[in-house]
Amino acid sequence: MRICNTKWPDQNWRDAGKRMSDRGIPSEQHEIMQENLATYLSHRTRGELSDRWEAKVSRELAKPFSDDQVGPRIDALQKSLLENVQELPSYPSKIYLTGSFSRGRLGANSDLDGYATLKPEEVSKGFDCYEKRVESTDACLFPMSEKTPGFNRANLMYAGASVEIDPQRLGESGYLRKVYTCVQDARTQRRETSAPYEWATGKLWGEGLSAHSKREQFEGKTFKSKVTNAVLSLGGTLAAVPVVGAVVRKVADLCVHQSHLEKPQV
């Protein structure tokens, strides 16, 4: 695994280094941490960070990590992900990792989030597993049904970044490290979301939803969630249509940077 991705040594990078220096954290052997902080700082609007990104900065500074801690963390997350998969009724047909892993900014404090595509009759048990794991600091998979491709595609577009992995290779030593190197190589920018998108999604989904509430929303048990799910399904379906799909994906990219890797051949 490559030590760091420092393609953009700009003002965000320098500001990140200053924040670290103020806490007595040297840049040497902490380049991954500095790059992650620079990524968070790149989301400043008129010089200010939203609460979401400022919380990420504070979290990293409160628990600094060195570069050589990241590789072992990926190995630990791979083990946790394998345990998560083994708790499901059967192996998922597909797994998409999202969050910091798919963005190429995973640190030694990161957890691992993603989606598991299951048979429709197994989704409920998949939610049971999700609710059990969602508050942990390890791996957690949100279940999706094999019979809702449009809705599934929309959720990945909403996440903005994903990387498909091979569930059958999770027992292979170093597999996720190799995948992560591919993710880093494919990274093209720091800024991930637009300010209007963050405001709109905060209003739509709410802040601090419990795992049970997320389950109810996903299953469409309220009028609001039914409408939301219908809109997502339509958008995800249209995204696969020639010509129209290109427009849908372009609009999505303006809101949240779309970065999706198909299963890397590693």
Image: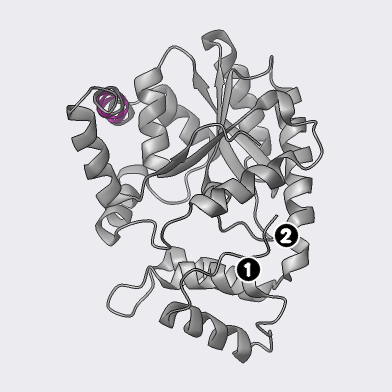
Quarter of the image holding residue 188? Answer: bottom left
Q: Residue 63: horizontal and vertical position, in percent?
A: 69, 71
Residue underneath mark 2: 70
Label 2 secondary element: helix
Determine crowd level at label 1: few under 14, some 14-19, many 20+ residues with C-alpha closer than 10 A.
many
Quarter of the image holding residue 125? Answer: top right
Q: The C terminus lies in which quarter of the figure? A: top right
Q: Residue at x 47, y 35 (%)?
A: 214
Q: Is residue 200 magenta?
A: no
* C-alpha gap between disc 2 and disc 1: 8 Å
Which labelled disc corresponds to residue 101? none
Residue underneath mark 1: 32
Quarter of the image holding residue 167? Answer: top right
Relative to 191, residue 114 above or below: above
Q: The N terminus lies in which quarter of the figure? A: bottom right
Count the marks: 2
Q: Residue at x 37, y 38 (%)?
A: 157
Type of amino acid under label 2 = Val
| Mark sitting earlier along the chain (2/1) | 1
Determine crowd level at label 2: few under 14, some 14-19, many 20+ residues with C-alpha closer than 10 A.
many
Q: Residue 117: horizontal and vertical position, in percent?
A: 54, 21
Q: Residue at x 68, y 44 (%)?
A: 178
Q: Kindly give the residue lying farthest to the front in the view shown.
A: 265
| Residue sitting nearer the eye, 190 or 49 | 190
Q: Residue 248: horizontal and vertical position, in percent?
A: 22, 35
| Residue sitting nearer the eye, 92 or 84 | 92
Residue 163 appears left or right of 247: right
Magenta span of residues: 226-235
Type of amino acid under label 1 = Ile
